[in-house]
Image (cartoon, rainbow, N blue to C red):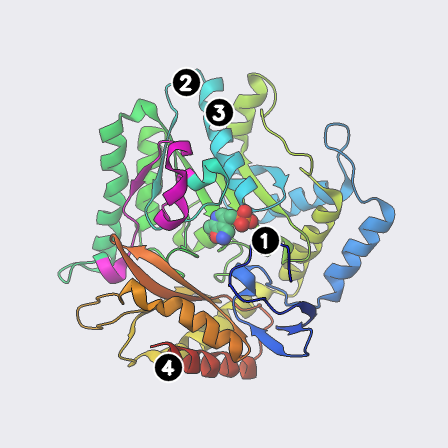
Amino acid sequence: MSHIFPRHTRQQPPVAVGGDGCYLIDNNGKRYLDASGGAAVSCLGHSDRTVVNAIKTQIDQLAFAHTGFFTSEPAEKLADLLIANAPGELNRVYLVSGGSEATEAAIKLARQYWVEKGEAKRGRLIARKQSYHGNTIGSLSAGGNEWRRAQFGPLLLDVSHIDPCYEYRHRRDDETAEDYGLRAAQALEEEILRLGPETVMAFMAEPVVGATAGALAPAPGYFKRIREICDKYGVLLILDEVMCGMGRTGSLFACEQDGVAPDIVCIAKGLGAGYQPIGAMLCTSEIYGAIEAGSGFFQHGHTYVGHPTAAACGLAVVGSILERDLVARVREQGDKLAARLEDRFGQHPHVGDLRGRGLFRGIELVDDKDTKAPFDPAKGVAGKVKKSAFEAGLICYPMSGTIDGKTGDHVLLAPPFIIEDGQLDELVDKLAGAISAAI
Ligand code: PMP
């Protein structure tokens, strides 16, 4: 009997004992094709010797030194590498232990920036419905996942949530994708004006929405317009690339494909590839400069900020992604996965939408394809897909999200960048079986 929580099922879970490339292995020797990397974490698979060796070398030399006293070589090198490859003017780095720590830090950094600038009225954050930014109180407040927020209402910050950019459900028949992108972005301007621009500190969004919406990519031009609106009112743009960053969508930072650079970006999962807990927040020197010129330092901190072993891991992961040009591989294998999903599910009566970028793909399951009506939540379709897939040896990430106030089901796929063609076939075969068993 396991005494560890959380447990995501009522049954005793199998014990994971090994990893081999794209597969996880349990204590009965059963192999599971990892098509979600947990939650889009394991971009290099489960047995990358380069990363393991980098971690071992670092621990042998120095496991930990507190940033209150020291910096370390791997942390400095990782920061330099991220800056060299980041879009726009992102040239200051804050290393943390995961995604929620990165988004939480981003919210506080944005607030402190405005205070240091003498605009203390700017305390309001705008984010989007159907988003997830983490599980700490600040990041949970930013997220629009109603199910996760439900019990914590009184503790949450007062964040405005505008509609997401959700072409499949919100684009009108008489609109082009571009028209819709511009209209969706206007929701931000309306909310800024409603609140009063002098009270708004930042807008936070995932460029490609992961857990709550199943690899939902923006309509063309959406983020360009968002950037313009932020600039017009002096609102900071915080992009949460915790899930979609580090090559997952076919560019190192997902926002590169939208032609925008944020003021602050958060990354995590693919940064450590699961080998160490690590996340990062990058910001512009305009932001950090204001803080340095004011009180001098960011009023924040965790014991494991800039952890040398985690940084050595991140350095090896990002170094591998760049040296092996895995981002190009993501585009290639991503196109193949998209084609296989289209072949298998394009005409499926319960597949409403196939979407995503690179090796970040989503399938929206619907009860009625013509009306786009979601399934009755009582059917628990997403949970059943997850269970059947797992039994068949496939790990995918089905979720029940909130779609326009109703619960909807989708499946998120985020396999390792090293996935081979035969494994893409295995993925799609097993997923098709799981969906048939669930519906
Ligand atoms: N932001 C996004 C977009 C995420 O997908 C997640 C994790 N699913 C987080 C933040 C929080 O990251 P973590 O679970 O590492 O705290």
Q: Is mark 4 within 8 Å of ligand 1?
A: no
Q: Is residue 62 magenta?
A: no
Q: Is residue 283 left or right of residue 230?
A: right
Q: Are marks 3 and 2 in contact (CB under 8 Å)?
A: no
- In the rendered structure, which disc, 1 or 2, sits on the residue that comes first in sequence? 1
Magenta residues, as a range? 141-169
- Front residue of 261 and 235: 235
Toward which corner of the image does residue 120 lie, by quadrant?
top left
Q: Which mark is residue 113?
A: 3
Q: Amino acid at mark 3?
A: Tyr
- In the rendered structure, which disc, 3 or 1, sits on the residue that comes first in sequence? 1
At a point 31% along the width and 32% down the height, the residue shown is 232
Which residue has dot 4 on it?
436
Which residue has dot 2 on it?
120
Tell me the mark number nearer the camera, choosing from 3 and 4. 4
Q: Amino acid at mark 4?
A: Ser
Q: Which mark is residue 423?
A: none
Q: Secondary structure at mark 3?
A: helix
- In the rendered structure, which disc, 3 or 2, sits on the residue that comes first in sequence? 3
Tell me the mark number nearer the camera, choosing from 3 and 1. 1
Which residue has dot 1 on it?
5
